[in-house]
């Protein structure tokens, strides 16, 4: 699917209402609470906000994403902030790194893009990249969010530089998302871009089972930002 082509250039901008500073602080505190080492990888890093936040917190982090457009913006933003960021093109279901790392993170729905049949393999690739005792922290959008709040619903927004229409179709195992963007050029004219996204609905139980099968000995589960509410987002912190 042609995911994150046009959206790759605007992802961080369109998600600015998600409170990135608070979210990144939760991530940093979570890694510290589990005694994560210094070297890490940010899987599905997108435009690199969490990569940059971890670097500023003193961690040595490499960002990985499947979208060249996402990585192009990530590199630009890292340079603008004077950070020495390394970003690599990669897929969590085939993840390989040069040398093991102390921790891995995958924030904001990365695992919802992995089909249920590939979940165990994806976790296995992450485990293979971690040192013994390494930490893996990630989140998923909940089944309720995908099936009730997003599925069969339409969203849209009209901005000065970018507008979009977002249609969703409920599938047996998740949601197909059809997005149309209108991006304003320097000459004032708008160009249309179309993308298709496919997100899968994973149950907490199936995720925990796949993690154990992939070699993660301990799994700790929380709601968004460490709260008890798992209705929208579920966080998993795992120890290899």
Image (cartoon, rainbow, N blue to C red):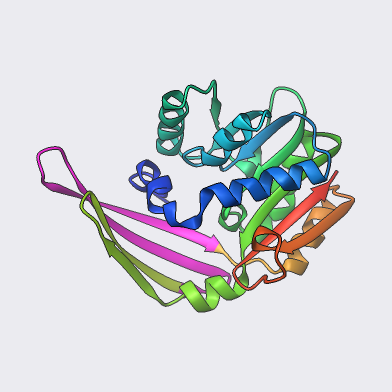
In the image, what residue occupies the spot 36% across and 45% down? 10
Residue 227, image x, y percentages: 70, 65
Query: Against 30, is 166 above or below?
Result: below
Q: Position of residue 101 (x, y in %)?
A: 76, 30
Q: Position of residue 51 (x, y in %)?
A: 58, 35
Q: Residue visible at 44% across and 23% down?
A: 79
* Relative depth, front residue between 117 and 76: 76
Q: Quadrant of residue 186?
A: top left
Is residue 4 among what the camera can see?
no
**Residue toward you, 205 or 2:** 205
94 vs 100, left or right, is: left
Q: Which residues are magenta?
A: 170-199
Evaluate whether residue 49 shows in this view: yes
Residue 67: where, in percent of width, then height? 46, 39
Q: Give the dominant element type of the magenta stretch: helix, strand or loop.
A: strand
Q: Is residue 53 magenta?
A: no
Q: Locate residue 52: give its quadrant.
A: top right
Can you tell which quarter of the image residue 70 is in? top left
Q: Is residue 57 above or below residue 115?
A: above
* Residue at 40% in and 76% down: 153
Q: Residue at left 78%, top 57%?
A: 210
Q: Is residue 240 above or below residue 164?
A: above
In the rendered image, the quadrant that contains the C terminus is top right
């Amino acid at each position: 699917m042609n995911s994150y082509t046009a959206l790759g250039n605007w992802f961080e901008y369109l998600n600015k209402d998600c409170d990135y500073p608070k979210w990144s602080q939760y991530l940093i505190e979570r890694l510290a609470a589990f005694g994560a080492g210094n070297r890490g990888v940010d899987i599905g890093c997108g435009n690199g906000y969490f990569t940059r936040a971890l670097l500023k917190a003193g961690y040595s982090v490499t960002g990985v994403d499947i979208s060249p457009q996402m990585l192009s913006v990530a590199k630009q933003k890292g340079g603008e902030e004077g950070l020495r960021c390394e970003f690599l093109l990669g897929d969590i279901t085939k993840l390989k790194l040069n040398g093991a790392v102390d921790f891995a993170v995958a924030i904001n729905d990365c695992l919802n893009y992995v089909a249920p049949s590939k979940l165990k393999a994806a976790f296995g690739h992450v485990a293979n990249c971690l040192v013994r005792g390494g930490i893996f922290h990630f989140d998923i959008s909940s089944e309720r969010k995908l099936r009730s709040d997003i599925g069969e619903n339409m969203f849209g927004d009209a901005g000065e530089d970018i507008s979009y229409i977002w249609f969703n179709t409920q599938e047996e195992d998740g949601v197909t998302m059809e997005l149309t963007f209108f991006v304003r050029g320097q000459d004032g004219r708008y160009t249309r871009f179309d993308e298709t996204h496919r997100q899968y609905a994973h149950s907490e139980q199936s995720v925990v089972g796949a993690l154990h099968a992939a070699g993660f000995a301990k799994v700790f589960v929380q709601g968004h930002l460490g709260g008890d509410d798992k209705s929208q987002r579920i966080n998993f912190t795992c120890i290899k």
